[in-house]
Each structure stands twice: as C-alpha cells, then as structure tokens.
Image: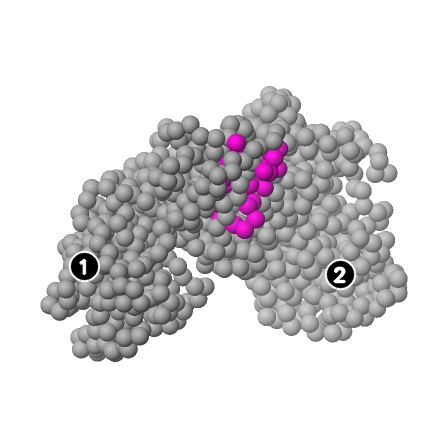
Amino acid sequence: MPTATPLSRVNDFVIRFANVNGSGSASANEMFARAIMRMGVPVAPRNIFPSNIQGLPTWYEVRISEEGHMGARGGTDFMVAMNPQTFDKDIAAIEPGGYLFYDSTKPLPKAKFREDITVIGVPLTAICNREYTDARQRQLFKNIIYVGALTALLDMDVKVVEQLIGEQYKGKDRLIEPNVKALHIGRDYVTLNLEHPIGLRVRKADKVGNRIFVEGNSAAALGAVYGGATVCAWYPITPSSSVAEAFTRHCAKLRVDTETGKAKYAIVQAEDELASIGMVIGAGWNGARSFTATSGPGISLMQEFIGLAYFAEIPGVLINVQRAGPSTGMPTRTQQCDLISCAYASHGDTKHVLLLPEDPTESFEFSAQAFDLADRLQTPIFVMLDLDIGMNHHLCRPFAWDDARVYDRGKVMTAEELEAGKDFGRYLDVDGDGIPFRTYPGTHPTRGAFFTRGTSRDRYARYTEEGAPYVDNMQRLLRKFDTSKDLVPRPLIAHSAKPTKYGVIYFGSTSPSMDEAIAMIEAKGHALDRMRVRAFPFHSSVNSFVADHDFVFVVEQNRDGQMRSIIVNECGIDPVRLVPILHYDGTPITARFIAQAIGDHLDALKVTPLRVVS
Amino acid sequence: MTYLAKPKFHHPGLPKNTLGYTHRDYEGAVSTLCAGCGHDSITASIIQACFELAIEPHKVAKISGIGCSSKTPTYFLGNSHGFNSVHGRMPSVLTGANLANRDLIYLGVSGDGDSASIGLGQFAHCLRRGVNMVYIVENNGVYGLTKGQFSATADRGSKSKRGVINTDNSIDLVAMALQLGATFVARSFSGDKQQLVPIIKAAIAHQGAAFIDVISPCVAFNNHAGSTKSFDFVREHNEAVNRLDFMSSRMPIEVKQDPGTVEIVEQHDGSRLALRKLAADYDVHDRTAALGFLQQHAAKGQIVTGLLYVDDEPEDLHAHLRTTDAPLNTLSEKQLCPGQAALDKINASLR
C-alpha cells in the first residue's frame, strides 16, 4: 500500500464518526460539532442514519470549513471508527494521508489498517471498564471520552466543551461533573500517551458571526407558529415527524394564553395521512390557518384531497420533507424527488405552488409565507424541504420578523359587506386575477352561504356538468396560477465575473454545494451564471435566464431530472438546452460531484463547441 | 319535480320559532333523490329539529362525503355553509372544521358505503377523539348512486334486487360507535319521524360525539322482499327501547306519561331528555349493557332503535386539547405571532 504525507490542515477538514445507533453517540457527536462552532469556525454536520432504533450502523459527519463551505464535501479526513460492523468499509473511506481513530483495547492485526493513513488507538473499552462498573455508563461515557481525546488531538479548546456540557445538563446538574470528568479522562490519555496535536487542527476564528445552528424541520415549524398556523394535523413519518413535534414544543412555549393557560392552537396526530390532509382542508375551509407535515409516501396518500383543495379552492399548507423514493425507498436518505408528484398532485388537470427553501432560515421564512400565500391564492401550498435540510443542523442567518407585518388573509367577504348587499359569487373573478372571494361558514344569517364541492360548479357555486361553465372555471384556475407567479419568492441570479454563454439552475439543499462548486469550476477557467429557483410556478425570469444562455445545467437530487422536466413543460423550452446534472444515491450532493460533472461537460465543449439550432 | 325551482313564496301565517324563523328558512334546494327515498324523510327531520330548536340557520356547518346520503345537505339549511368532500372522508374534514371554529354546530351526513366501507377508519377515529358533532349515517345497506351493490352494513343472508345473497358479515355501526366511545349513540328509522326528530334535537344539544344510525330504505335498489333494510322489514322488526321528548333548557318539563315509565336525562347544556321507556330493563347510561342488548336482539333478527347510550357529561376534543374559548379562526397576528423579541431569544439559544 502506498504511503502518503499525513494531512496537515487547519479549520478545513472532514471528520466522520462511525457508530452503532442507539449507543448514545449522537449527543456527544453533536456536542463536538457545536464546540467547533463556538470556537468561531463554521461547521456543517450531517447525520447518516438507518431506519432503525437500535443496533444498525450510523454515521455523523462534521465538515469544518473556515471558508464557510457548508455543503457536503465527500471523503473523510479523520475517521472515528467506533463500529466493528463497518470498520473495514470505514477505513477504506479515509482519504490518503488521513487519520483513523479507533478503540485499541483489543489489538487488531496490521492487515486491518492502511499504510497511507495515521492510526490513532485509544483503549476506550479498557478505560471505561476501569472507570465505571455500570454497563450503561460504560457505553455513554465512552462517547464523551472520545470527544475528550479529540480535543487534544485536534488542539481544541476544552473549556468550550466543558461549557457545552454545563449547558446541556442545566437542571440535571449532578450529570455535569461526571461528564466533565469523562471528557478529561479522554483528553488526558492522549496528552500522556500519544503524539498530539495531529496535522488536522481547529483554531479559534471569527467566522461564525451571528449565525444560528438549527435543523430545518424545527425552523419550518417555527415558521408555522409565526405564520399564524392554528391547526396542525399530521401522521408520523420519517423524516418529517420532527416538524410536528417541534411545532408542539414551540406552541407550548409561544402560544399558550398567559391568563387562561389555554392553547391558541390545536394539534392532532391523525390516523393516517388522508385524515391529516382532510383536517387541514376542513380547518382551512373554516378560516383557520392549517398545515400538515409529511414525506413522499404521505403525499401519495393525500392525492385525492389535494385535488379537492385545488378545485374547491381551499387554503392549506403541506410541509414535505422529501426522502429517497419510490415506494418506501430509503426513508432516512435525502432526495429532491417529489417535485412532479407535488407540482401536479391529484387526478385531472392540477397545478400547485411549491416553495423551495435552501436551508433552515429559508424554511422558516417560506413556511410563514406559505400561510399568506395559501390564504391569498385559496389553494394548497407545498413547502419542499428534504431530509438534509430538515434533519441536520445548519449554520445559517438568524431568524428575523418584521413586527409590523400583518397576515394576508386574502379575499374574504365579511358580514358587513354581505349586509351592504355586495354581490357574492364564490367563483366570480371580480378582480381579473383569477382569485374569487370566499366567506367563512357562519358569517351571515341569510347571505353568503354556499356549497363547497369537488364537482364542477358555476360562478355562483351551483352544481353543473355543462361544458362552458366548467371550462370557464378551469381557465380561471389557470389565471389564478399565473397570478401566483408574482407572489412567490423570486429566483436569485448570480452572474459570473466573466461573460458566459452557460448557466446553471439549482434549488433547495443543493445550494451550499453549488456555491462551493462554482469556485472550483471557475478555478478551472470556466464561467457560469447561476440561478437559484425558489418556487414553482416559475417567474418569467426563468424563461429569460434560459433564453439568455446557449445552454443551462439543471442540478438536482433525483434520477429523472424532475425540475428540468417541469421547466421544459411549463416554459416550453427545447430540452436540448437543459443539461441534467443528477445526484440521487441518497447522500447530499457534494461540490466535488457538481464541479466534476459540470467541469467534464465544459471541458468537452472546449474541444467541440455545441451548436444550438434554434 | 326536481327540475322546478322551489318557490320562495310562503304563507304569511306559517308558524315562527323563537328567533322568528319559519320552517322554510331551514329548507334547502329541492331534492334530486328518487321519489320516496328514506333520505328525504331524514332531511325533513333535520329541518324540523333545527326549526324547533330555533338554531340560527347559518350557525350550522353541514359536511358530507360522497354518495346519495352525502348529497342531502344541499336539501336542508340553505343558509348554512355546506361541504360535500371526498368519499369516506367527511369525519376528517369535519374534525378540522370543528378545530377551526368551536362555536358552530357540526352536522356530518354520511351513508353506509361512505362510513362503513371506504370511510370506516375515519368513522372510528373521529368518534374516539370525541369531536363535538352530530354524525348521521343514512343507512340503506346498498350503494345507490352506483346502482345497487351491497354495502358493508347489508345483513348476511339478505337478498339484492338482482337476487344475489350477501355472504359477508355486516358491520353494525351502532355497536362500533358504542365500543369506540361515542358519548351519544342512537338508532332510528327514516319512516319514524316521531322518534327521529327528538333524537336529532338531543344529539345537537349534546356537547360531544353524537352518532345516529338511521335505517333509510332505498326505494330504487333495496326495498324488495328478502332485503333487511326495506320499509316493510324494518317496520316489522323494529324494537324501540324508548321514545324521546326533547326539552331545551328554556322549556319547562312537561311529560304527561305514566311517571313510572319516564326517565329524565339532563344533558350538560341544561337541556332535558324525557325517555318514555319501552323496554323496562334498558339503561341509557350503561355502555356495556347496551352492547349486549344490541347483540341479543340482533340475534333474534330485531333492529333495536331509540336512544341507546348517552353520557350526560361528555368531554370533547377541544376540552382534550385545552383550546381557547375564542374560536381559532378568529385569532389575529396579535394573538398568534410571538414577534421579533421572542425570536431574538430563540436565535440566542441556537448559537
């Protein structure tokens, strides 16, 4: 096996923890990541976990990047190999010159290791057996002990970790001392027995600023609180369950009437996704802001109701935390694979509004905005997270709210207006924007009542199966969809420093890797204009962006190029001009992947320039 | 005559209720169901009950699924909002609507296909949650709109119009409702308005999950010899356990029957039910005994009707969730949005 110079980098490396799930490693690993953030160094952790509660392999990857690259990078520089099941695979994954940290209690044959890596053994089990008698303690403290060892190896500030332990066990103070002790047992072992620090180091910096460290699901749930959601109906499904759970927690703190102790919200764990969306629609019909959180299989189950809400024009918000499909697919792996199933959900001609946040902060913002859009447009709004955004901590802009902001409740005719004799036709397009007025049930004793139905109706909500009023209504729904183009978040465009004929369109969790990939692509001498699409339907700038370039890469995390298909379909673009860049193995897309894939295309073009026949 | 618009004219001497509304103010569009359909009798009973209770005609939300029965909300309470949702899913839509505004009366109308087959799950779960509603199943044992297939409430051994014998066991929604914790459970017969109207009134007054199974013969597909949901069969096999008089909290108790056979039940809202007991040993407060009573009579081929169970102190979903007295749909950003100050604290906790 070849040898390699040990990696020597400060504040720029990837460390990966290989654990067994259910072993209590998650909180120790998270503490490690937080400690780096507290040292002022940007950090991007990612959980790679199985759909299982105990006993299967799980990984926690921490990317440390003073430069601020927060996408997954690919490759591992330092492996904490705590899982014998995956030991060989984990060692194979280490970059040449990288480091292996393992439990050296039981000597392993030399053949188990690689010559081109630095092997660091700490007899964790032996230490735990010596220090603790209780089996559970042996297991839990082992995690803290390796964190302690890492602080010495990576030259970290141990005080920061001590402080985090203090914060974590605040209120359970008797746990602080033994955890701090375990931390130092690990640290002291390294200080006394091993060469330290190693080539990979964490140095205090000032690059985190006022950013916050938060999971997208929690942020989206907070957005629902701020957006005025009062009814949440949901059914547990990975990876979205923590949206409803976070909403429950946020509401308990922020939405209980201080005088009466009563709840200004209602949360129901429904019997299935059909009931969840049914409750959301019932509440939306009755004038409350309501939402559900689900994932792909849930969206499949909700199809019939989504069509009803579209056709009967009932507001509602669906937070879809996407996971790898089809079918049960890979429930704990990330993808952007529900674009088509949401954009065109349900039978018949339907189109729905999708919001595509890039990170937790945008998840907060878009989730709050979704309730305004749902009321304004009287239709379901999809907030499309994915597992990577939803279930991992991300370092992002702090949440902000304009206290002068007033909810847009849309076109609702009041009792006073009805009393004054204002003409009410539930499906009358009075303003030419395709959006009719509605009334809440119970508004006026003799005016404004109507029958809501999934069957065809005329402008006054009267049942009809005649062709002309049906077409009239379907055309109005299209006008309404057009209206939404100017209400949803606009795409963001970044032009290359050099003029270029090539562009790239991307969205959602691809964002951080794209930022990094651009730097890599430009370093190779290429130039690329960028557009981050933030919603469907597309703003007209999407058409012009494609028109302004010879061709455009569309980067997405699914097999079939769903975003590309929707752009082709909705913007009437020649598919040849949209080059799919697809990553869909369930891991988050990396800058290395994007730079390689796009770079190869551009390199090839340098040799044989593509002629676009228009 | 369904193609004729209903005349708006009415006799000036029509009796008015305490709010000044006439019977006509509680009507809806003309029914498009078959002449003689049991469902139209239920519609008439609902109108009668709402008129007599002097409910403001717009303070009811009528919610249904899909099917003949689910069409009926168009035919009553024309000043109320109605929602004809999707097949078998009335309960979830009603639950959501109820969560949004606890101040309206929720009338869920469903059928045996809608509730016992495609919607059995939602039927069960909305009862377990104690949603404050009146859930009426217009039960004819047959799929009418699709022309006569058996439904899941069709009795085993009953014969379809085409002569096919049903070999599947039937689902008794009343027994299920009892088992699932509904706090008001009744069965009635569309042809017995005297029994049905007071039951509907009592169910509306009930502040919890009220379920009424109304046997409602289908004149087109299930009213022949061999059917156990025909007018003749139900009349012959109807075993009423009680007859009900409903008195709102504002009315004095006037029961002119033999006191030994009358039981007064006071509901949580102050209204009273006077039960004229027909089966001496029947106790409307004993859920377990009610189940046994039902099954013993079913074994004898008898259809037990009347108020079968009532909990005088029901707790509804809003009580479980401890929601504010003000309906959730009336809360504004002032009450709902915690603002930047709270966000500053949250941001600080995430660093």
**Mark 1 → mark 2, Cα distance in angstroms:** 74 Å
Residue A442 location in percent, x, y?
58, 36
Residue A556 is one of the magenta-drawn residues: yes
Depth check: give the residue in front, B164 or A357: A357
- Residue A363 in view (yes/no): no
Q: Decide: few, some or many residues near mark 2? Use Cα within 10 Å; few <14, some 14-19, many ≥20.
A: many
Depth check: give the residue in front, A223 or B114: A223
Local SS, label 2: loop
Q: Which labelled disc corresponds to residue B228?
A: none
Residue A229 location in percent, x, y?
46, 42
Which residue: 80% across, 56% down?
Answer: B217
**Tag 1: residue type?**
Ile
Of the 4 image quadrants, the one containing the C terminus of chain A is: top right
Q: Which residue is mark 1?
A: A198
Which residue: 81% across, 70% down?
Answer: B157
Residue A491 location in percent, x, y?
46, 32
Left or right of A30 in this view: B331: right
Q: Which residues are magenta?
A: A550-576
Location of residue B10 (image quadrant): top right
